[in-house]
Image (tube, helix red, strand yellow):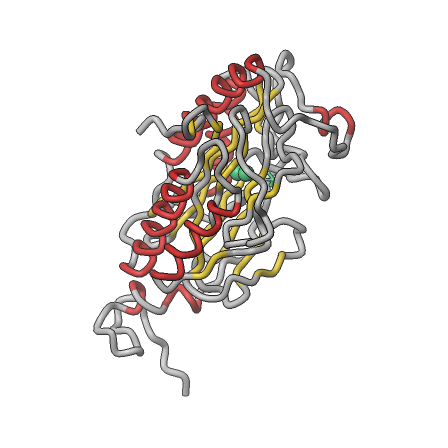
Amino acid sequence: MTATIKANDQCFCGSGRKFKRCHKTSFDPIRPGTVGPLREVPDGIDLPPYVTEGEVIRRPEPAVKSPDVIERMRRTAADAAKVLALTGAAAEPGVTTDELDRICHEATVGLGAYPSPRLYGEPPFPKSICSSLNEVICHGIPDDRELRDGDILNLDVTIFREGVHGDTNRTFLIGEVDPESKRLVRVTLECLERAIETVKPGAPFNGIGSAIQSHAEAAGFGVVRAFVGHGIGEQFHTDIHIPHYYEPRLTTTMEPGMTFTIEPMITVGAYDHQVWDDGWTAVTIDRKRTAQFEHTILVTDDGAEVLTAWPD
Ligand code: MF3
Ligand code: CO
Ligand code: CO
């Protein structure tokens, strides 16, 4: 006979907490849901080249942006942050990730912008936002799954307007979340903040990963290696790669006018991953939880400007 442990029973591990607040999550993996149709983009919104060309063709793009590109990036990135805030405000138990995709999509096109994930990459990403729950590291596809009390949800918004992208993400707590997951989310945000503090002209790019890895590991957490921060501007991803772990060989230094993302993914357990058959959804190998925060950053004459500063 198999005894069934109910959500409100005491956890088997002896913690004294309810099962649903303790070990339930690791026995309840996220499963692929039903993905709705691609959302329409109204006429008059400029499409990025990968949509009109049907594939991502990398072009040379200067790492140091012109004042004109920087001005456009300031405006686009600030609106990406607004879209993320208003989409996140709707994230609560019972709401589907597809509904959050609708909110993001409509807010983005309402601002005259294109939702960059839509039709990006291979296979073409089928939705307008990335929604990554619990053990999903990144690139989760919105579907008909309803958010549940105790989930942690990363929403990653990128928008394209005036010929440039702005990219930002946050992890939201859904209802009442267990203490260990809350600590994961807090430490992950601290990792991003500490990494931003290293940004200034002449600083080595490897200082970013160093700051993140030391803080995460001191808290007993892991740092995902397989997904990195990236140069951004007229293209969603340029050839600048920014690991979130310490990479001693990465001694190149920052210059004023460079724009890139920092987006640490931090894990409770192992940092290795698997990708679902959908070609996108990346989950932790042990199905333990993971969190992420992301900003688009400009190197200024004396430090960093956070182009995607969240309004709230
Ligand atoms: N926004 C993600 C990043 O931070 C990239 C998403 S690619 C997509 O780089 F196609 F899934 F949207
Ligand atoms: Co990014
Ligand atoms: Co992103």
Tell me: 136 left or right of 163: left
Is 286 or 298 nearer to us in this picture? 298
Question: Quarter of the image containing the C terminus?
Answer: top left
Identity of the residue drawn at 45% across and 24% down: 301
Residues 121 and 5: in front is 121
Q: Is residue 35 visible?
A: yes
Figure check: 172 above or below 267: above
Q: Residue at x 56, y 51 (%)?
A: 33
Residue 280: % across, % down = 63, 49
Give percent across and percent down for residue 165: 57, 26
Return the residue found at the far front. Answer: 202
Residue 237, compared with residue 284, is above or below; it is above
Count the numbered circles shown.
0
Residue 140 can be seen in this image: no
Residue closest to the eye, 270 or 240: 240
Q: Residue at x 24, y 74 (%)?
A: 15
Instruction: Single out the residue that lies furthest toward the left.
Output: 16
Name, please, the residue furthest toward the bottom: 1
| Residue at position x 56%, y 56% in the image | 225
Q: As rendered, which of 86 and 311 lies closer to the eye?
A: 311
Q: Position of residue 153 (x, y in %)?
A: 42, 47
Q: Quadrant of ligand 1?
A: top right
Q: Position of residue 74 (x, y in %)?
A: 48, 19
- Quadrant in which the N terminus appears: bottom left
Q: Quadrant for residue 37, please give it.
A: top right
